[in-house]
Amino acid sequence: MEPVRLPDADLESIEASVRKLLDRSAEQARMIDSLAAAPSADPRSAGMPYAGIPGIPAFIPPAPPPEPKPILELEGEEFEDELAALTDWVDDHLMDVYGAEITTAAPWCPQWQEHLDVVAWLHALWMAYQQHKDPEAGPSGMFVWHRDFLTHAMAHVRGAGGPLSACQTDPDRPEHRLLRAPGPSARSIAREAEAQQEGDASASPQDDIGLAP
């Protein structure tokens, strides 16, 4: 068979196409190697194994929001900041919309922040409010909040025998008083006394040795 001869222009076009195919194959091989490699310690590529590949812009993922904690588990400045935010919501939204009238059957205290159980209830109610007003909760989210959270929380906090029942209900004579909390049980007191006696008994021989001439 006679050899086939191609014009020089066609040969150059074929060579250029082959070079492009080889370059593309090498780039795909590098991308596969990067995807198969261990995750980089670089925070810019954390969670993005293809970061750093030519043609793909670097991306810094946002830091996840802190997990919500019950307010009574917070301390110091963190507690004060959370209490200030809670106070804004209670004063500007909760009591403004759902406060109703202050009566002996529904008392209220202008110093409710000093009633720790009230703070805990209202903070839990606030966290539930933030969860159920989110669009992911669906159209019935706020109804669920009213039915399952608002009603029960306000019935406890503002109940006639609730934590605010000892506070003055007359708006012209506001008064604040903390109810006496239950103390330790008799069993706990006896156990602590017994432990203290055992501690005194074990310490007395050492005292005698220290006083010996």
Image: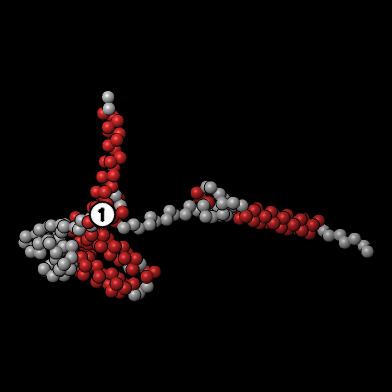
Q: Residue at x 76, y 55 (%)?
A: 15
Front residue of this view, candidates 111 and 197: 197
In this rendering, the answer to whether 161 lies above or below 195 is below
Q: Position of residue 211 (x, y in %)?
A: 26, 28
Front residue of this view, candidates 164 and 9: 164
When asked about the image quadrant of residue 129, the answer is bottom left
Secondary structure of the residue carrying numbered label 1 = helix
Q: Residue at x 25, y 56 (%)?
A: 187
In this rendering, the answer to whether 195 lies above or below 208 is below
**Quarter occupied by the N terminus:** bottom right
Q: Residue at x 26, y 60 (%)?
A: 120
- Give the residue at mark 1: 188
Residue that lies at the very extreme toward the left in this rendered image: 172
Q: In the displayed structure, does residue 160 sit left or right of residue 187? A: left
In this rendering, the answer to whether 83 lies above or below 153 is above
When asked about the image quadrant of residue 32, the answer is bottom right
Q: In the displayed structure, does residue 15 sit left or right of residue 54? A: right
- Residue 87 appears in the rendering: no
Q: Residue at x 9, y 59 (%)?
A: 174
Q: Position of residue 118 (x, y in %)?
A: 22, 61
